[in-house]
Image (cartoon, helix red, strand yellow):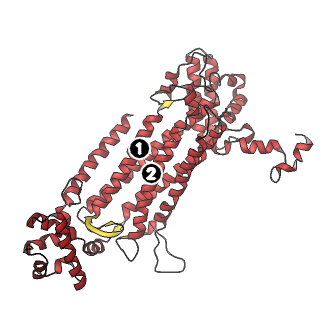
Amino acid sequence: MSENKASNRMWGGRFASGPDAVMEAINASIGFDKKLYAQDIRGSLAHAAMLAQTGIISAEDERKIAHGLNTILSEIEAGTFEFSAKLEDIHMNVEARLAELIGPAAGRLHTARSRNDQVALDFRLWVKEELQRVDAALGGLLEAFLVRAEEHAATVMPGFTHLQTAQPVTFGHHLMAYVEMFGRDRSRVRDAIDRLDECPLGAAALAGTGFPVDRHMTAKALGFREPTRNSIDTVSDRDFALEFLSVAAICATHLSRLAEEIVVWSTPQFGFVRLSDAFSTGSSIMPQKKNPDAAELIRAKTGRINGGLVGLLTVMKGLPLAYSKDMQEDKEAIFDAAETLDLMLAAMTGMVGDLEVNSRAMRKAAGSGFSTATDLADWLVREASLPFREAHHVTGRAVALAEERKCGLEKLPLDDLKAIHPAVTDGVYSVLSVMNSVKSRTSYGGTAPAEVRRQIRAWRKRLKADATAMKRR
Ligand code: ARG
């Protein structure tokens, strides 16, 4: 490097050695893409085998290449491999070491390939494996919900709208709402896997290759359903990464909503649940406190994942076809989101599993706030043939009276109710209790314990079917 480059003050500070160092710092991705080493080597092994099979390289060269690649794999796994930023990325680090190990045959590996299809392959493989991990983690979370929902199929609690007591529901039903949410997340994960299940190898730089490659062979060897169809799209497409981040962001949002509920439920004011010591911490100054840190962190970590999604959407939005170096910026957000989501799912699964439920507090709260007012209105419609709007009005007067007397609806004497509307009879009291209210909501998907148990059974069946479907892939 020339003296004047080294002393160029424009580059400043830590780049004392001049523009080459700045270029290296901005250009190199090895710091993070070394995470793709296993996928990179797997891809190269499949590519070399195909090159030999089609007669593009000799069997002898392929043998040497495969041996060298396997040596590199062990070196990386043993921690003895020396990564170099000068060699930019994982692809060139592996190839340079291969040349050291096997000599000129190494130079034949990159025949009919470009780093553009290579990186698209490595990253797809990585994202696919991560989606499979998320799928399994979601399976575990869903199982944990089903166990708790079964246990609490008949535990009443207030159902909320606007976080104001609305109607009594069962805790089992509330938990099953999350089963629906995480069940949708899981189906999004599988959709994403289906869509990305195409092998980029053979698209080369962007135009395909003149060598007689067999793209179906490499696709099959690497566990993809089929090769991609358009070489230009193949090297410029990062939809699979965007989809992973979208799926992760939606799932994190669900985790965050539950985390928020756990934070609220575990306050002394609600007292619906108690967190185990494993998922809470004490305060260093206030001895009485038990803080829901794990739930709070789940809620907070959602921000990183959402940020990653917006970040990559922004990287991609202005890129002309096909590959641009911008796309090297696709990885860190994904790696971080994946690690974050895995951790969030593990923590939530643990919390759901050992949440201590205070059924008494839930039952007490379920009866407050005139939560059975709708039941009274419904009774007037059913038993006294009032139009719903009139029944609503009559019920409103009953609630006002109960509020004035500072008692629950079920405590109002029959004569007072009759004074509000003459059609009221003794029978009305059967619907004013929280348990009867809940039991009456037998509509498909409703909160009646019998219906909740039916939903749980259906989900158990579905999870079994999902597990077999995943194995068959
Ligand atoms: N490190 C690069 C990336 O992650 C690999 C592809 C480089 N391709 C190129 N044409 N410079 O995107």
> Of 449 and 239, which appears nearest the observer?
239
Q: Nearer the viewer, residue 67 or 391?
A: 391
Could you tell me residue 405's position as x and y percent? 22, 85
Alpha carbon separation for disc pair 2 and 1: 10 Å
Q: Is mark 2 within 8 Å of ligand 1?
A: no
Relative side of 335 to 460, left or right? right
Q: Are marks 2 and 1 in contact (CB under 8 Å)?
A: yes
Inspect the image, locate mark 1, and give the three-letter code of the amino acid beneath it.
Answer: Arg
Pointer 2 or 1: first along the chain:
1
Which label was assigned to residue 188? 1
Asked where in the image residue 467 lies, by quadrant, the reply is top left
Q: Is residue 247 left or right of residue 451?
A: right
Camera sees residue 35: no
Q: Nearer the viewer, residue 234 or 274?
A: 234
Which residue is the site of mark 2? 250
- Element at label 1: helix
Relative height, residue 219 to residue 407 (above, below): above
Q: Quadrant of the N terminus?
A: top right
